[in-house]
């Protein structure tokens, strides 16, 4: 189950990162999130997500290696939950209803994923 969770983390972060690197402004617009002046920071986030995905994949494939691991993924997901929740509370998360709904959906998915990961850490 540990390898499956790490692969799920890798796929989720890898696909998100690829979209942000390839189509940063379009991805932001499609999901109704706050518009960016340029694609630089969304692409940097995409690069960080792909790096985390690679670390999770390395940990899943070669358990003797020291990749990100499940504990690291749990910590990063908890920080993402706290930041997204604080942005929603302050009203800076997204200008559209579709964007706010997407963020609430991401919060719920990350929270459920964290609950499962806590059981295996």
Image (cartoon, grey):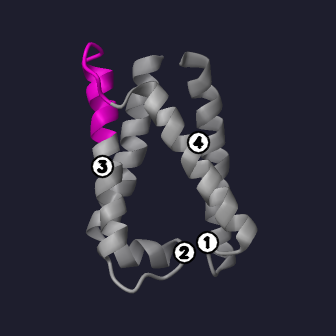
The boundaries of the magenta stretch are: 53-67
Are the residues tagged 2 and 1 within 8 Å (C-beta)?
yes
Residue 16, horizontal then vertical, whole percent: 39, 55
Looking at the image, can residue 19 be seen? no
Cα distance in 3D space between marks 4 and 1: 20 Å
Q: Residue at left 72%, top 71%?
A: 90
Q: Earlier in the sequence, mark 4 or mark 2?
A: 2
Q: Earlier in the sequence, mark 2 or mark 3?
A: 2
Which residue position holds label 3?
50
Circle on res. 99:
1
Cα distance in 3D space between marks 4 and 2: 21 Å
Label 1, secondary structure: give it: helix
Which residue position holds label 4?
78
Q: Earlier in the sequence, mark 3 or mark 1?
A: 3
Main secondary structure along the magenta-highlighted residues: helix
Q: Earlier in the sequence, mark 2 or mark 1?
A: 2
Cα distance in 3D space between marks 2 and 1: 5 Å
Mark 2: few/some/many CA within 10 Å (<14, 14-19, 20+): many
75 left or right, relative to 116: left
Which residue position holds label 2?
33
Q: Nearer the viewer, mark 3 or mark 1?
A: 3
Residue 62, horizontal then vertical, whole percent: 24, 18
Label 3, secondary structure: give it: helix
State how many labels appear: 4
Residue 10, horizontal then vertical, whole percent: 36, 38
Are the residues tagged 4 and 2 within 8 Å (C-beta)?
no
Outermost residue, right direction? 89
């Amino acid at each position: 189950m540990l390898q499956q969770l790490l692969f799920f983390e890798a796929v989720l972060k890898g696909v998100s990162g690829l979209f942000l690197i390839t189509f940063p402004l379009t991805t932001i617009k499609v999901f109704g999130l706050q518009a960016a002046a340029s694609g630089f920071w969304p692409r940097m986030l995409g690069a960080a997500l792909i790096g985390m995905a690679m670390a999770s994949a390395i940990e899943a494939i070669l358990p003797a290696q020291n990749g990100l691991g499940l504990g690291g993924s749990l910590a990063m997901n908890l920080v993402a939950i706290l930041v997204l929740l604080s942005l929603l509370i302050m009203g800076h998360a997204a200008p559209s209803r579709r964007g706010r709904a997407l963020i609430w959906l991401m919060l719920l998915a990350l929270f459920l994923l964290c609950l499962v990961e806590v059981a295996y850490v």
